[in-house]
Amino acid sequence: MIDFAYRTSNDYLEAKEKATDNPEAFWNEVAITFDWHKPWVKVLEYDFHKPSVKWFLGGKLNITENCLDRHLKTQPNQTAIIFEPNDLSEAAQRISYKELHSRVCQAANMLKANGAKKGDRICIYMPMVPELAIAVLACARIGAIHSVVFAGFSASALATRINDADCKMLLTADGGYRGNKVTPLKAIADEALTQCASITHCIVLKRTGQNIAWNTIDLWWHEEIEKVTNNCPAEIMDSEDPLFILYTSGSTGTPKGMVHSCGGYMVYTAFSFQNVFQYQKGDVYWCTADIGWITGHSYIIYGPLAVGATTLMFEGVPSYPDYDRFWEVCAKHKVNQFYTAPTAIRALQKHPSELVSKHDLSSLKVLGSVGEPINEEAWHWYDEHVGKKKCPIVDTWWQTETGGILITSLAGVTPQKPTYATLPMPGVQVVLLDNEGNEIEAEAEGILAIKHPWPSIARTIWGNHERYKNVYFSAYPGYYFPGDGALRDAQGNYRITGRVDDVVIVSGHNLGTAPIENALNEHESVVESAVVGFPHDVKGNALYAFVITNDIIDDEEALVDALRAIVAKTIGPIAKPDCIQVVSGLPKTRSGKIMRRILRKIAADQLDNMGDISTLLNPEIVEEIIKNKP
């Protein structure tokens, strides 16, 4: 196992000082612990104004050799992946590094045999089974760029992502188990592919055995895998070659395909994984996320495997067959590090604490939180009932765009503070800005920004570098702007205060409001809509839609049902608004801009501080919306 963790507060303080004084020397020291075919000639070259960021220039590697091959020399029989299926009746699987290496190489050869090559984009739309992780690593093995699409997304959302990246191949499954439901993944994929001319092969994993339609481009995974050997030398990649594209919601209608590179991403995910969770040899680590999100990429697959860890993959949901499933799995596999979302914690908190206490959780050493800031009540419940007040809680702040955790405590090494992400990782230079872009010192509240690159920063938006510049680097020139506000206490701890743009975090997932509004506006009765977030005691935030119709609606309930169905079909069930209110107008400025600030206050019932509405084009509409609020 590779170990570059700081185990004491002094180690951390020394690393932080070194990383601040000389970032290039610091990251050079971390990067040389990995296997490279050719060393880099320069550690870093960047310009945040262009923007352009390059790490380990000229370095040659393959990330799968660092996640698999190098561990064969020291721990071939160490468990790499534990797979916990959805149904209790199905046995768990333990896959060693030796077996994982063999299966990845075989899958890589399967891809090559069907025409995939270096630089091709391969879309993966699969359930949370070992073959999903194997597919990701197989793409990386041959230098193909993987684009994983969450298996809860609709056919329309899948097609949009396939077409944006011009993907050549789709990897999917007949279906997927999720609690007591079976998702018809192949049927959804078939619908998507009617709009996708670039796909030449669709390889289908048999998971559920359900009846599926069969098309001329379809191939069975189990049949194709038998045709090839498990000997597949890794493609040598440049440090800056793209590793994967992962789509995240934007404030405009089209999703953003964030591009992560091979070298810097590998170095930072491994470094952050081991330090944040204080992973030690023999530990069992479990991140409950889906690989369809960045958390699954960085902290189920690449980060843990790069250091030789044992990582657990879970196919199911926390409520099936009962609300103690997480704790049953922790006890069953003697989990040491447990990383989940505040949404899950809040949902489980509502059920009797006996569901937790009846399981032996004594193996737990570290708890983690990801996706959104964790509220204080949930933090204390997590600490008391799950961690028994003996497990540090790492409240991690990061994004799809950042590739890895940027602000967090290090478990048991640096101080934790409920509701605070706390301190930046060594090598991450966080600042607070005022509205004019000036840095604010000491204890303050402002706009979160980062003034120096870290290795796993996304390099661009696929096919649209101008958008990358406009979204992340134009608002505050010379800084990376993540779209969040924050406050900083006297000790330098950061607390994230929420989005300052038109993105709402629902159940830990970034949802752009524009695509949801576009979907609502597709309905023949809708003239215009506005979607905002409002606090929700389980999801953190929920979505509230205000819609203007072109006529009086006789059956509002039927309209609401139809609108929710459109959003679910266009984007996915996760984006369905919790509340839809039909209104005669929306509060607008004289230039026609919708005043979402006012709508957010109405949705959240914060009616005592509406601010000045006299400058609105139609101030009377505010009172009307409040009066008719359901």
Image (cartoon, rainbow, N blue to C red):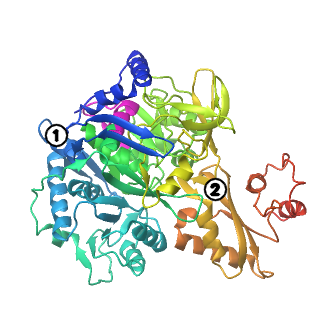
Q: Earlier in the sequence, mark 2 or mark 1?
A: 1
Q: Is residue 22 left or right of residue 132?
A: right
Q: Nearer the viewer, residue 171 or 474?
A: 474
Q: Which residue is mark 2?
A: 542
Q: Which mark is residue 70?
A: 1
Mark 2 burial class by Cα count in 10 Å: few <14, some 14-19, many 20+: many
* Amino acid type shown at disc 2: Ala
Disc 2 to disc 1, C-alpha distance: 45 Å
Q: Is residue 241 left or right of residue 372?
A: left
Q: Is residue 486 left or right of residue 110?
A: right
Q: Which element carries disc 1, helix, strand or loop?
A: helix
The residue at 56%/48% (across/down) is: 351
Q: Position of residue 54 (x, y in %)?
A: 36, 42
Q: Which element carries disc 2, helix, strand or loop?
A: strand
Q: Which residues are magenta?
A: 268-286
Depicted 587 relative to depicted 393: above or below: below
- 273 in magenta: yes
Q: Position of residue 107 (x, y in %)?
A: 19, 61
Depicted 121 relative to depicted 379: above or below: below
Image quadrant in which the N terminus is located? top left
* Residue 231 in sight here: yes
* Amino acid type shown at disc 1: Arg
The residue at 37%/60% (across/down) is: 148
Mark 1 burial class by Cα count in 10 Å: few <14, some 14-19, many 20+: many
Q: Nearer the viewer, residue 350 or 8?
A: 8
